[in-house]
Amino acid sequence: MATETVVNDPIHQFRLHSLFDLFSVGGHQISFTNSALFMGLIVLFITGFLLMAASKAAMVPGRLQSIGEMWYSMIHNMVNNVLGEEGKAFFPLVFSLFSFVLIANMFGMFPYFFTVTSHVIVTASLALFVVGLVVVVGIYKHGLGWFKLFVPHGVPIVILPIISVIEIISFLSRPISLGLRLFGNILAGHIVLKVFAGFVVSMIAAGGIIAVSSVLSLGMAVALTALEFLVAFLQAFVFAILTCVYLNDALHPSH
Amino acid sequence: MDPVSAKYIGAGIACLGMGGAGIGVGHIFGNYLAGALRNPAAAGQQFTNALIGAALAEGLGIFSLVVALVLLFVK
C-alpha cells in the first residue's frame, strides 16, 4: 500500500517523519519529529489560552474567561469528589494531564494536524507515569502498609491468596489498560474517519449511480467527525478521572 | 492455509471481541438511564460512575482491536 493508494491509506496519517535531526545516541538518530512539534504546540496553546483567559479576571466573566473557569472548575470538582481534601496536592497533575490529552485529541481532529495521542508510546508513557506515581505516593504515605491494597478486608482466609493474586494482576494491568484505551479510541476513530472519507473518493471515481450514493458516505463521515469530537473530550475526561481513582488507592489503600 | 490469509481471518475474529464491549457499554448506559428515570434527582451524581464503568468496559474491547491491529500491521 505504499505508492499508489497514499490518498486512501488510512494509516498514512500516523506516520512520523523527522523535521530536523538533532544528534544520535548509540546509533539511534534522535530527531525533532512532527509529533514533538505538535506536543510543543499543544503546550503553547494551553499556556497561551489559559493565560489569556485569566489575564482580565473580570467580576462578570467574558466568553474566554468562562471557558477557562469551566475547564478549571470541572477538574477541581472531580479531584475534590474523588480524592477529597488530601487530593488537593494532585490537582495540578490531573489538570495538566487532562489539558494535554484533551488538546492533543482536539488538535488531532483538524485536517493535516498530527494526533499525538494516536501513538501508543505517548499514551503508555503517561499511563506508566500515573501508575508509577501511585506506587511511589502510596509507599511514601503509608510505608509497607500500602500493600494492604492487595489484601482486601473481610475476605475469608481460604480464598484470600486467590483474591490477592487477582488484585495484583488487576493493579499491574492498569498502565496497559489506561494507555491502550486512549490510544485505541483515538487510533480507531481516525482510521474509521479516513476509511469513510476514502469511500467518498473511490465511489466518485467509480462514476454513475455509485457516485451519487457517495453522499451517504460523506454524511457518515460528517456524523463520525461529530462523534470523534465527543470521544476526544470523553477520553480525556476518562483518563483524568481514572488517574484520580488510581491515586485514591495510593491515599486510601484500606478500601 | 496461506499464512497471510490466516492472519486476516484472525484479525477479523479478534474484532468479534469488540461486540462484547458493545454489549457491556450498552448495559451500563441502559441501566444508568433506567435508574436515572426512576430517580432523576440522584442521576447527576452517578453520571461519572457510569462513565468510569463504560470506560473500563470499553477498554477490554479496545484490547481486541489492538490484537487485530497487531495481527494486521506488525511484521
Image (cartoon, grey):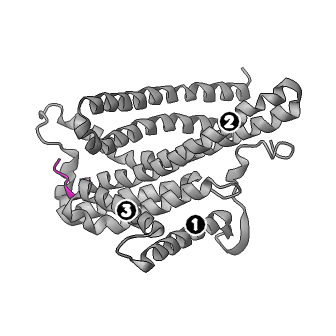
Report the amino acid beneath label 1.
Answer: Met
Q: Quadrant of the N terminus of chain A?
A: top right
First in sequence: mark 1 vs mark 3: 1
- Residue A163: percent from left, percent from top: 23, 36
Q: Nearer the viewer, residue B40 or A88?
A: B40
| Outermost residue toward the top in this view | B1
User: Which one is in front, A76 or A162?
Assistant: A76
The residue closer to the viewer here, B18 or A202, is: A202
- Residue A219 is tagged as 2
Mark sitting earlier along the chain (2/1): 1
Mark 2 is surrounded, within 10 Å at the Cα level, by few (under 14), some (14 to 19) or many (20 or more) other residues, namely some
Q: Residue at x 53, y 44 (%)?
A: A185
Query: Magenta segment, which residues?
Result: A249-255
Labels 3, 2: one chain: yes
The image shows residue A108, relative to residue A173, as above or below, that is below
Which element carries disc 3, helix, strand or loop?
Answer: helix
Cα–Cα gap, marks 2 and 1: 31 Å
Q: Position of residue A109 (x, y in %)?
A: 61, 52
Residue B2 horizontal/vertical position (percent): 74, 23
